[in-house]
Every structure is written in C-alpha cells, then in structure tokens.
Amino acid sequence: MRTGFRPGRGLLGAVAVLLCVGLPLEGQGPTPAGTQISNVAQAIYVAPNGHTFTAVSNVLVVTVAQMAGVDLAPPRTTTANPGDRVAFAHTVTNVGNGTDSVRLSATSAAGWPTLIYRDLNGDGVLDAGEPEIQGPVTLSAGAAMALLAVVDVPSSATVRGTADSVTVVAVCEFDGSRSDAVVDVLQIQDVGVLVTLAKLVDRTTATAGDVLTYAVSYTAAGINPADSLVIGDPIPLGTSYVAGSLRWNGAPLTDAAGDGGEFDPAGNRVRYALGDVPSGTSGTVGFQVRVDGGLGPATPVGNTAGAMYGTVVGTDSVVSNAVVTTIVLAQLGLEKTLIGPTLARIGEQVSYTLVSVNRSSTTP
C-alpha cells in the first residue's frame, strides 16, 4: 500500500475566508464622499497532514460616491392679525455625505408676500441686519443652518378668520431629486366683527363742469359691534367738493363736524364718524364733486374709500373697491361748403353752409 501526500488530492482540510471592509460605526454619519475603502481577502486552510497555509489576495480600492440628502424641520403653526409680519423658524441640514448647495423657496397659498432670511443668531426672530436668502446656500456634510420663512399678512381686516399655508422647500443642487419640505399654518385671528365697504359712482364718463355722485355702502357682520367706525374718502384729483352734498342714509349732513360727517378742506377729504355700529347693520354715505377744467381727454378720475374701527384686539382697517370716471372732451370742428355761385357778379348773393362736427371718439 502506498502512503503519503498525493498532489492534487486531499489538499484542503479546512478553509477560512476573511473580508476586510471599512464600514461606518453605528451612530456616525454617512461615509464622506471621496473616501477610499481598501479590500483584501485572506484564506487560511489546514491540510490533511496538519499543516496550515495562508493566502492573501490582491488589494482592491473602492471610492465612496457622493450621495445628496437634505432635511428641513420642523413644521410650525401660529396665529396672527392683519398687518403682522410672521416668521416661521426652521433648520435646514445637509444629510448627504458631501458638500452641497441647497435651493430654498417659500410659497404662500393665499399669495401673500413671503421671503426667506438667515437666522444668524438662531433666536427664531427676524432681527435687523439678517440677510434675505436669494440664492443657493452651501453646506458641508452634516452642517445645519437656521432660517426664517417670513410672511407679510395683508393689513385689510377682510383676512380676519382666514388661514394660510406656507410651503417651504429645500432642494439639493447635486441631485435635484433629493428634497424636503415643511408646511407652516398661519391662522388669522377672528375678532367677531368685519366691516366691508362697496363704492359706487353715478358716471363712468364726464367732462369739465359735470357733477359726480359717490356712494359708499358699509356692512358690519359678526357677533360683535364695530366700535367707533370712521369712513374717510379723499376728494379725487381734478375735482372739487360740492359744498353741502354730504349724505348719510339719504339724510343731508352739514360740512362741519358734529352731525356724523364733515368736509376737511386742509386734507381735501370727507369724513364720517358713525360711532359704534352693531353687528348686522348696513348703511350708505355719500357726497358730490364737480369736475375741474384743464383735465385732458381720457384722464381717469379714480376714488377709493377706507374705514377704521375698533375690535376686541385693537383697530382694524378696510378699503373699498376703486371706481373710475374717464374724462371726455368735445373736439368741435366746422365744415364749410360753397352752395354757389362759384363765379359771382358785384352785388350778387353767395350762399354757404356750415356744419359743426364733434370729432371726439365719445360724446360728453
């Protein structure tokens, strides 16, 4: 019988393979982009005769690619009043594994003016000197930045009781498919009363010397009264107030203060102090103006009224719709025609016709 080692047979008694791969430890961030990871394989085996053998592979190197990622937090909810400037505080973080630029935007569902600012001291308040973000911001991997989404609430009390949602979006420039967003909710406080104004004028066109009659209808709606309601109306440019034309629900008022209405020559406006107006009350005030000379054709004469009144949280204001009267002017022309004769003797009568023509595009 033959004994001993026979080449090619019974060589491998046991094999152990060890793969050495660099992996991030738990709790650490992603492996930075550009990191090179070396990989070596090692085999250890024991022959039937008890000898141990070791084999080492060649070295392979893998470079970690950049992966984009961004986090935007947290969503906010708050309450405000008309005319307020509201700041929603957020933090944007680069959760990718490499330096990236992030584009930021904020959009109001109600269409109210909305901008984004750097919150340099991270206090959640827009302070003087904090810059508006107008382009991409660059963040290294793992870096964070405090920002403010700032909304300007319209000053008109007509937004009372409404809500707006502001969507703030962060998009990675390295990979535009990686983004994050939050939605902020802005509730405008309801104070239990809202005054609305509707403005009318009796003429859409006029010429010099014509009288225009303006009317402003007001309504107080809600569960609370409109305290100390005052309606103001400026006299339109190119017109003059008609003395004694103030009216309140059809009744004449004097031009002096004391009976609810007055004409203010210094401010060139009319003013109605209507006192406390209970909820559900409506009324109409009005006045007249005369169109001055010197206005050119197609000149618009516009007018808008405004009102102020007290609520449980302070003073609210509203503005009416605008009305416009267009100035038209006659352009008189004369056309003369010879009837005859074309050849006249001394003492003979010659006849003509004269025709006046309005060459303007409209009839005053």
Image (cartoon, rainbow, N blue to C red):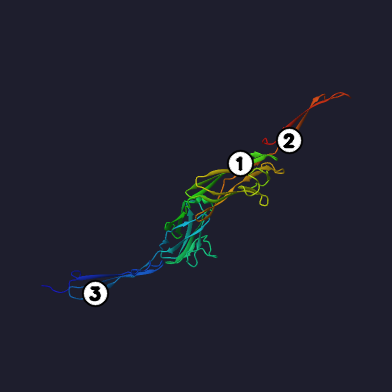
- Who is closer to the viewer here, 65 or 325? 325
Q: Earlier in the sequence, mark 3 or mark 1?
A: 3
Residue identifier under label 1: 251
| Up-down relation of residue 64 to residue 185 (above or below) | below
Q: Position of residue 317 (x, y in %)?
A: 55, 52
- Who is closer to the viewer here, 25 or 324? 324
Number of residues whose C-alpha sits closer than 10 Å to that of mark 1, classed few (under 14), some (14–19) or many (20 or more) = few
| Amino acid marked by disc 2 | Leu
Q: Earlier in the sequence, mark 3 or mark 2?
A: 3
Q: Earlier in the sequence, mark 2 or mark 1?
A: 1
Q: Which mark is residue 74?
A: none
Residue ranking furthest to the right:
346
Q: Quick check: marks 3 and 2 in contact, CB under 8 Å?
A: no
**Looking at the rendering, in which quadrant would you find the C terminus?**
top right
| Up-down relation of residue 338 to residue 253 (above or below) | above
CA–CA distance in space, label 3 to label 1: 116 Å
Residue identifier under label 3: 53
Mark 1: secondary structure: strand
Residue shown at the point (24%, 74%) measured from the top left: 53
Number of residues whose C-alpha sits closer than 10 Å to that of mark 3, classed few (under 14), some (14–19) or many (20 or more) = few
Residue 140: image quadrant is: bottom left
Q: Position of residue 178 (x, y in %)?
A: 42, 58
Residue identifier under label 2: 332
